[in-house]
Amino acid sequence: MSTIDSAKRVMSGTFGEFWWDGELIAECYKFSAKYTNTKEAVNLARQMMEDSKVMGSKGTGSVGFYKVYSRFKDYADAVRDGKDVRGTFVSKLDDPDAYGSERVALYNVSLDEVPLVNWERKTIQKDEVPFTFTSHKFLESTMA
C-alpha cells in the first residue's frame, strides 16, 4: 500500500449508513464493531516474556441513535416476555473523496441493553446500545 496523497482521502463518517434487518436507520449517528480474542497464557521454557494462545473470539459493538422514535418498544416487550431477538446489522461507508467504499454485515446480532427511558433537559436525546454478534461478511470493499 502507498501513502495517501491528500487528507481528503481519509474516510469521513458523515457518509456512513446503518441498516438494521434491511431497514436504513437514518437517525444512527455512530456505529462500531470488533472482534476481541480470548487468550490463555503460555509460558515457554527459557523465555521471560509471557506468550499466549488464542482460544476463542467474541464479536462486540455499539450503535448510537438520536431519539426520534420509540425504536426499542418491540425489543423491550420481547425482553419482558423472555424472547431473545436476533438480527442483522449492515454498515456502509462511501465517502466520494476517498479511494473506495466498504459494506460489512454482522450476523446473529444480540442487543446487550434495551433502552426504556433516557433523557436530559436541554440536550439532544440519544440512545447508545451495546451488542454482540457471532459472524461477519465484507459485502463490498473497494478500498485498496
Image (cartoon, helix red, strand yellow):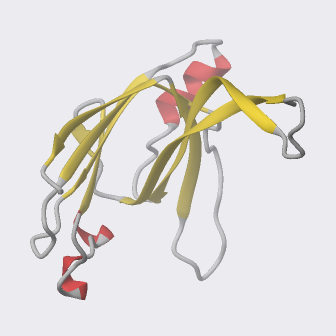
Give the residue at x 47% y 52%.
32
Q: In which quarter of the image is residue 94?
A: bottom left
Which quadrant would the N terminus be assigned to in this image?
Answer: bottom left
Vertical relation: 32 (above or below) 130: below
Q: Where is residue 100 in the image (x, y as percent from the top left)?
A: 13, 60
Q: Which residue is drawn at 61% across and 44% down?
A: 115
Q: Give the quadrant of the C terminus.
A: bottom left
Q: Which residue is drawn at 66% across and 71% down?
A: 120
Residue 141 placed where, x, y %? 18, 46
Is 110 on the left-hand or right-hand side of 108?
Answer: right
| Residue 140 shown left or right of residue 75 in the figure | left
**How far across and down, in percent of the image, does residue 7 sit?**
25, 86
Residue, x 54% and y 44% (percent of image)? 61
Spot the residue most to the top: 82
Locate residue 74, reporting x and y percent: 48, 28
Horizontal relation, residue 95 to residue 73: left or right: left
Q: In this view, does 26 lie above or below 20?
A: below
